[in-house]
Image: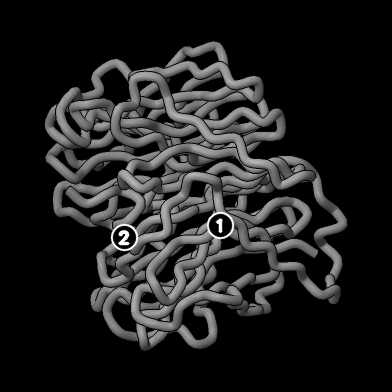
């Protein structure tokens, strides 16, 4: 069985086939709701790159540390893979760098810490002995509350996925039913759950609706797969109205992964040749597509946008012609700067995988070295 997080490491795997933590490559796991006017100004300071390892992370191929969510204070949540190839959650203190590791009680296989909010509450999912997934919320003090969506399947790789948590403690995610079809899920801090399906979503295995993030206004984004196995982005208003969109004419797959407080959406799409392209959708509905300089033009190469902050800065990575991943930041005005991780490998399926950008412009994620080991990183100014 392939580990979920490890599926991300193979850039030649189509992201649409990956499990949700692998979807970190295409899902925004950042926290973008507080105002950050200072981030609107050009920043010419030299960034500081900090690599880190979680105690207990193993050092074999496809093991190591994988940073994911980042809050406004710089606290990070993520996953590390131990010597038994099990995935465990961690939270990194923004001041001291100290790591707190955890597994969900009953999570006999893997615990995926995916997102962290300003209160230090973490959301994610874990798998039990039968490889059924369950959502969870972990308070800053360590108390963990597990949850299952009504209608979630109980078979292997079915169940409930917590993806993003907002300032109020509400979780956005989805669940997979017994047939393997997905349904959007919103869980309020009180525990009340609301399920929804995008109009046109298919009901067969691998089809359906996956919600990735909600803004401070309560609007939710994600994608749905129709009965023809084509994916379309969607925007769900607070009242429940759903707007479907495709990033470009003829797009084979559109994934809306992130939305900021202004209602601007970032994501990626693939064309008929399975080449990836970034896009940004304004609150008005206007869509601008973009390419990171150096992005490859072959199948499963190109540009993948993963997160957007309040200033409209988009972070992500691009896969070059050699299938190496390299980071980029796109300013709200459209200028794109690229960056690399010291120590990142330069072979196929190696490189850097930025996942989150907060209001201060700090960036979190991981990189894969020449031995195919993952390392967490934080890039600050």
Q: Is residue 8 above or below residue 181?
A: below
Residue depicted at 37% across the width and 88% down the height: 321
Please tell me which residue is depicted at 74% across the width and 57% down the height of the picture. Answer: 311
Q: Nearer the viewer, residue 7 or 331?
A: 7
Q: Position of residue 198 (x, y in %)?
A: 33, 38
Position of the C terminus, as image quadrant, is: bottom right
Mark-to-mark CA distance, 1 and 2: 21 Å
Location of residue 145 with respect to 163 vertically, above or below: above
State the residue position of label 1: 376
Quadrant of the image occupied by residue 117:
top right
Q: Quadrant of residue 184?
A: top left
Assess disc 1: are there few (<14), some (14-19) or many (≥20) residues with their C-alpha within 10 Å of its C-alpha. Answer: many
Q: Which residue is mark 2?
A: 15
Provide residue 79's location: percent of width, then percent of height.
47, 45
Q: Residues within 10 Å of mark 2 (few under 14, many from 20)?
A: many
Q: Is residue 276 left or right of residue 99?
A: left
Name the residue at 45% across, 42% down. Answer: 212
Mark 1 element type: strand
Instruction: Give residue 8's quadrant in the image.
Output: bottom left
What residue do we see at 51% from left, 75% from top? 344
Label 2 SS:
helix
Label 1 vs 2, first from the N-terminus: 2
User: Would residue 260 be seen by someone viewing this image from the given angle?
Assistant: yes
Question: Is residue 287 visible to us here?
Answer: no
In the drawing, does residue 33 fall left or right of residue 14?
right
Q: What is the number of the mark on residue 220?
A: none
Percent across and percent down for residue 82 are: 39, 46
């Amino acid at each position: 069985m392939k580990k979920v997080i490890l599926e991300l490491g193979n850039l030649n795997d189509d992201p649409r086939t990956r499990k949700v933590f692998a979807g970190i490559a295409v899902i925004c796991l950042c926290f973008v709701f507080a105002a950050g006017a200072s981030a609107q100004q050009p920043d010419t300071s030299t960034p500081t790159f900090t690599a880190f390892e979680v105690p207990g992370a193993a050092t074999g191929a496809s093991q190591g540390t994988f940073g994911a969510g980042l809050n406004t204070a710089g606290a990070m949540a993520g996953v590390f893979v131990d010597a038994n190839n099990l995935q465990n959650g961690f939270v990194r203190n923004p001041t001291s760098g100290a790591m707190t590791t955890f597994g969900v009680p009953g999570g006999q296989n893997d615990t995926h810490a995916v997102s962290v909010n300003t209160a230090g509450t973490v959301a994610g999912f874990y798998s039990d002995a039968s490889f059924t997934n369950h959502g969870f919320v972990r308070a800053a003090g360590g108390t963990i509350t597990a949850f299952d969506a009504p209608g979630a399947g109980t078979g292997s790789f079915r169940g409930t996925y917590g993806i993003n948590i907002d300032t109020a403690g509400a979780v956005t995610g989805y669940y997979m039913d017994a047939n393997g079809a997905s349904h959007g899920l919103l869980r309020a801090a009180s525990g009340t759950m609301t399920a929804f399906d995008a109009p046109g979503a298919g009901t067969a295995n691998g089809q359906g609706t996956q919600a990735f993030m909600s803004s401070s206004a309560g609007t939710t984004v994600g994608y749905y797969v129709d009965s023809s196995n084509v994916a379309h982005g969607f925007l769900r208003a607070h009242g429940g109205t759903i707007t479907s969109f495709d990033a470009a004419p003829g797009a084979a797959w559109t994934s809306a992964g992130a939305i900021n407080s202004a209602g601007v959406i970032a994501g990626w799409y693939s064309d008929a040749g399975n080449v990836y392209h970034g896009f940004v959708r304004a609150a008005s509905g206007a869509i601008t597509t973009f390419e990171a300089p150096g992005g490859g033009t072959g199948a499963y190469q190109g540009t993948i946008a993963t997160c957007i902050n309040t200033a409209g800065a988009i972070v992500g990575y691009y896969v070059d012609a050699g299938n190496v991943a390299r980071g980029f930041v796109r300013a709200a005005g459209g200028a794109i700067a690229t960056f690399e991780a010291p120590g990142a490998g330069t072979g196929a399926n190696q490189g850097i995988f930025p996942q989150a950008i907060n209001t201060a412009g700090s960036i979190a994620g991981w990189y894969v070295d020449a031995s195919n080991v993952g390392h967490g990183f934080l890039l600050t100014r």
